[in-house]
Image: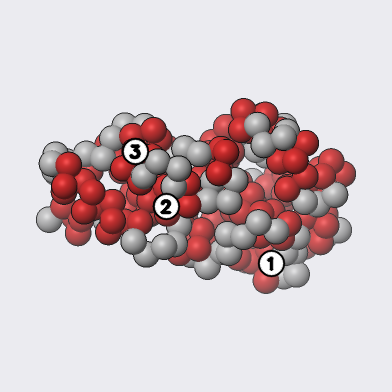
Amino acid sequence: MPTSAISSVEDKKRLVRRLAGSGRGFAEQYGFRVTNNPSSLFQLLCLAVLLARRGDFRRALDSAHALPDNGWDSAARLARSLHGDRVRVLRDSGQRGDVDALADTLGDLARTVVERYRGDLRRLRAVTHHDPARERELLTELPGVDAAVADLFLREAQALWREVAPVADRRALVAARRLGLGRSADDLAGLAGSGESERLAWLVGALARVDLEKRYAELTG
């Protein structure tokens, strides 16, 4: 059955407070730290690459956790890993399909981040002088990073890199439309509060979780 959209302004604000009130976005809700350091940012980028693949999002989460659990918690360490070891870890964490290609992509991504930015995505931000369009452009020049992956990464990073806000990925916008909260990242930014990129990141991440976990009934029932 279709979800009943929320129409009154007060009800929308109440729902936004409920969704964003935990003070944790998508990544942190699932155990990934969102901090402006090289290791955390690279792990968020790997998470985005994995989430963009087709299939159960829980496999993506398990694989994203498996990388640092195996000692590959930074671009430099993943860049030094062996292809066969990456394949094994990804398969053990539940990945299906062309795992060899995925292992290649993650290895290429890590090596490129090391070569271009010395393993630190903050350098990518610095060379753009915090220009959000250029940041997105440079991200999509990395192996395995297309527009959808960039959206998933920036959805989290906007809590730290305020200039890229507002960002909302496809799933968050699906949930926003079904719940009557708007149809664009700008709509959600208006509800989160002007200039509140951290709160917006929490809201958008929560909306993505609602869609992935099919939790609409508990919010509108």
Binning the other alpha carbons within 10 Å of mark 3 as few (below 14), some (14 to 19) or many (20 upward) gives some
Q: Amino acid at mark 2?
A: Arg
Q: Going 38% across and 51% down the picture, which residue do you hit?
A: 203
Q: Look at the image and tell me whether residue 86 can be seen.
A: no
Measured as percent of width and height from the top left, residue 47 is found at: 59, 53
- Which numbered circle lies on residue 199? 2
Work out whether 179 lies above or below 95.
above
Q: Residue placed at 39% from the left, 33% from the top?
A: 186
Residue annotated with mark 1: 68
Which quadrant does the N terminus fall into? top left
Residue 86 as seen in the image, left or right of residue 76:
left
Tag 2 secondary structure: helix
* Quadrant of res 63: bottom right
| Snapshot quadrant of residue 92 | bottom right
Marks 1 and 3, how far apart at CA: 36 Å
In the image: residue 202, left or right of residue 182: right
